Image (cartoon, rainbow, N blue to C red):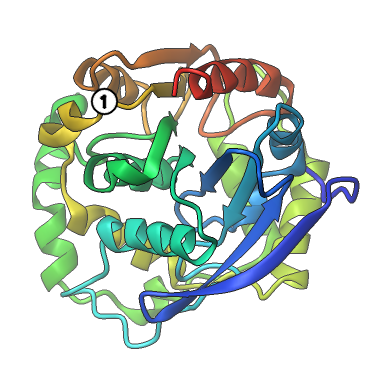
Amino acid sequence: MAQITNLNSTTGKAEVNGIEIFYESFGDNTHPTVVLIMGLDAQCVIWSHSFIAPIVEAGYRVIRFDNRDIGYSTWLDGWNKAKPYTLEDMAKDTVGLLDFLSISKAHLIGASMGGMIAQRLAISHSERVLSLTSIMSSGYALDPKLIASFSQRNFMKVLPKLIKWVPIPLKHINLKVTVGNYLALYKYLSGTKYDFDREAFNQLFTYAIEERKGQNPKARVQQFCAIVASGSRLNELHKITLPTLIIHGTADKLVPHTHSKKLASMIPNSVLVEMDGVGHEIPRPAMPEYHKHIIENFKKA
């Protein structure tokens, strides 16, 4: 997870959809491309070199990028929660990045919200996608049918309207950004099987927050509103006919693994891999298992 230096890369910014998207490319540009799409309030460096290197070594070019509102990409001013951007807009950012880099098609790996964006790409822009890997994600994050509590189910049903019409005090939007806060959050989201690597994550967030541009305090709210505004993809998942791999930890507290069970049941010929005891994370000790299934899925394209 720490920033290592033995994996060469090139960086740049692509002008797409009226904003700038920062990207980093690893490996030979003549090799098949893999695009990594990160999740909510997470900079692209969460896709660690430890995750990227085995994919490059397997013969692929790998691109990671900062979503809008995060890292080195454009932080949006004048955002309006009554008319927020959506996951479709973020999918179009990815298409624009592919256009900028003259890449006709790519394998997609998306984590959490990134998996939702990747699903949208596979549905709406399937001609640009070779295969889909959805990690710890959902076809509908607010799906009331996957919530046991009656009160929570009802809350999920009204949440989109609450977000759109109820004022949110600025003190709740401008979240305090510290390395300690992000360490505490990621420790909470870790699972039961692997120890939380505090030292590695401390290095990661120190780099992301103190050495890069920093962490946008509004990103978490604005990107979450994009998820809510986008609604459900459940009725469209049958349109995904690409090779699809779905990976989810059984100890995920943020997006329960029942979401991926449902996702797999609705995407034809998809493969579901459940990672026992893994939380909302991709633990380094488990990466060889992830890579085995991911490379197998690439080869089906």
Residue 192 visible (yes or no): no
Residue at 61% x, 62% y: name it. 23
Image quadrant of residue 132?
A: top left
Residue at 39% x, 14% y: name it. 272
Q: Is residue 237 above or below residue 3?
A: above
Q: Is residue 234 above or below residue 27?
A: above
The answer to whether 38 appears left or right of 241 in the picture is: right
Residue 252 visible (yes or no): yes
Q: Which residue in the protein does label 1 denote?
A: 241
**Residue 11, image x, y percentages:** 70, 65
Q: Is residue 267 above or below residue 135?
A: above
In this view of the protein, which residue sits in the foreground, 249 or 95? 95
Q: Is residue 291 above or below residue 143?
A: above
Image quadrant of residue 294?
A: top right
Q: Residue furthest front?
A: 30
- Quadrant in the picture for the C terminus: top left
